[in-house]
Amino acid sequence: MNSSPTLIRWGGSAAMLAGVLLIAADLLSLAISPKFPSVESLTSGPYAVQSVLKLVAAALLLLGLFGLYARQTEAAGALGLAGFIAAFAGTVLMAGAFWATAFWAPTLAAGAPEYFDAEGPSGRLANMFVVSWAVFIFGWLLFGVATLRVRIYPRVAAVLLIVGAVPAFGTLLVVGFPTGILFSAAVTWLGYALWSEKNAPVQQPAPRAQ
């Protein structure tokens, strides 16, 4: 993947902004019902802001992922490529879920409030939400492991990405306690590390010691 230093740094900016928006969305979850979204929470101001923030963050995260991967594409090898593809696919799926929570869920809550009187979506819809979560988590875990092995980015940031990917399962889509902040912080840190580099070339694999 041949990417200019300028485009790579733009990817860092996108990742950094995505992380900041996700942190803001996570903190807003404290102002919303900690359980599955109720009719009141889905039609509230904090939920409207939070859902849009997550949707914008997902779009930026896709751009940021390109930059983060381009910086280490050669050194990351097959594992890095697999992590990139899985993380990209998972983020695309989550972006679709975020669109649904931003626009479809509030509209349904206003028109058919009885749908949210139970424990939330069920059947195929619920299953696809779980699939989206699972692909997202697996992809970013894999990408985090590849990033940790390459050691181009700060090691602690890579570890934080791995550790934070699993708790992100709980709050990336629904409201509740902001356990996804670890993941958001890691993305922000990695994005800043990439953005702050000057004329960073695409990393080539380091020669192995004989």
Image (tube, helix red, strand yellow):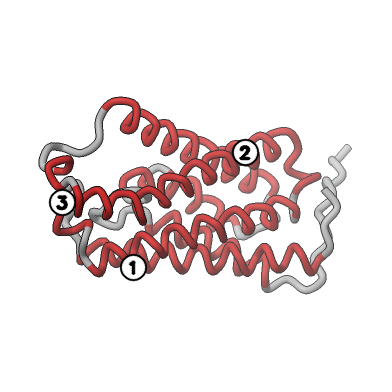
Tell me the kind of residue under disc 1: Val
Q: Which mark is residue 38?
A: 3
Residue 68, by quadrant, is: bottom right
Task: Mark 3 or mark 1: name the one nearer the start of the chain.
Answer: 3
Q: Secondary structure at mark 1?
A: helix
Q: Is residue 2 left or right of residue 161?
A: right
Gap in angstroms between the C-alphas marked 3 and 2: 35 Å
Residue 124, position as x, y percentages in the image: 34, 26
Task: Mark 3 or mark 2: name the one nearer the start of the chain.
Answer: 3
Q: Secondary structure at mark 3?
A: loop
Residue displayed at 67% across by 63% down = 11
User: Mark 2 packing: few (<14 Cα in 10 Å), some, or many (20+)?
Assistant: many
Q: Is residue 102 left or right of residue 44?
A: right
User: Mark 1 packing: few (<14 Cα in 10 Å), some, or many (20+)?
Assistant: some
| Residue position for label 1 | 49
| Residue position for label 2 | 83
Marks 2 and 1 in Cβ contact (< 8 Å) = no
Q: Is residue 55 above or below residue 141?
A: below
Residue displayed at 16% across by 57% down = 33
Residue 30, by quadrant, is: bottom left
Tell me the kind of residue under disc 3: Ser
**Front position among marks 3 and 2:** 3
Residue nearer the viewer, 120 or 168: 120
Residue 150, position as x, y percentages in the image: 70, 47
Tell me the kind of residue under disc 2: Gly
Q: Secondary structure at mark 2?
A: helix
